Image (tube, rainbow, N blue to C red):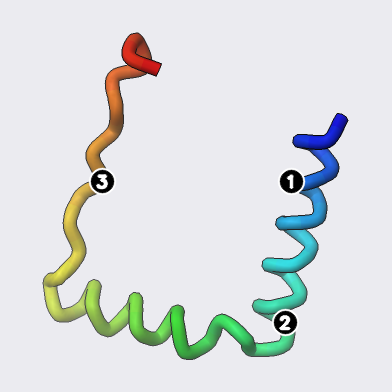
Amino acid sequence: MIVKDDAKLWDKQIEEDLETGRLDALLAEVDDEYEAGLAQPLEVPDPGVL
């Protein structure tokens, strides 16, 4: 199934990016914003609407 294959490829890419440090700057920015109190809760859509 294409969706499962895409998800596996996506997971592999993320793992490789984490291992090589490609996401370090982004993750540091997220941590800084969270510590500064800039994080906001996500709005979860009503499952009946989807």
Q: Residues within 10 Å of mark 3 (few under 14, many from 20)?
A: few
First reached walking from the N terminus: tag 1 or tag 2: 1
First reached walking from the N terminus: tag 2 or tag 3: 2
Q: Amino acid at mark 1?
A: Ala
- Residue 20's x, y, as percent? 72, 88
Q: Quadrant of residue 3?
A: top right
- Residue 22's x, y, as percent? 62, 86
Is residue 48 shown left or right of residue 18? left
* Label 3 close to label 1 by CB (< 8 Å): no
Residue 7 is labelled as: 1
Q: Quadrant of the N terminus?
A: top right
Is residue 8 shown left or right of residue 32? right
First reached walking from the N terminus: tag 3 or tag 1: 1
Label 3: which residue? Answer: 42
Q: Amino acid at mark 2?
A: Glu
**Could you tell me which residue is drawn at 28 percent across and 19 percent down?**
46
Closest to the camera, between mark 1 and mark 2, is 1
The Cα–Cα distance between marks 2 and 3, rounded to whole angstroms, is: 28 Å
Q: For this rendering, which residue is in front, 36 or 6?
A: 6
Q: Secondary structure at mark 3?
A: loop
The Cα–Cα distance between marks 1 and 2, rounded to whole angstroms, is: 18 Å
Label 2: which residue? Answer: 19
Q: Quadrant of the C terminus?
A: top left
Callout count = 3
Is residue 2 shown left or right of residue 46? right
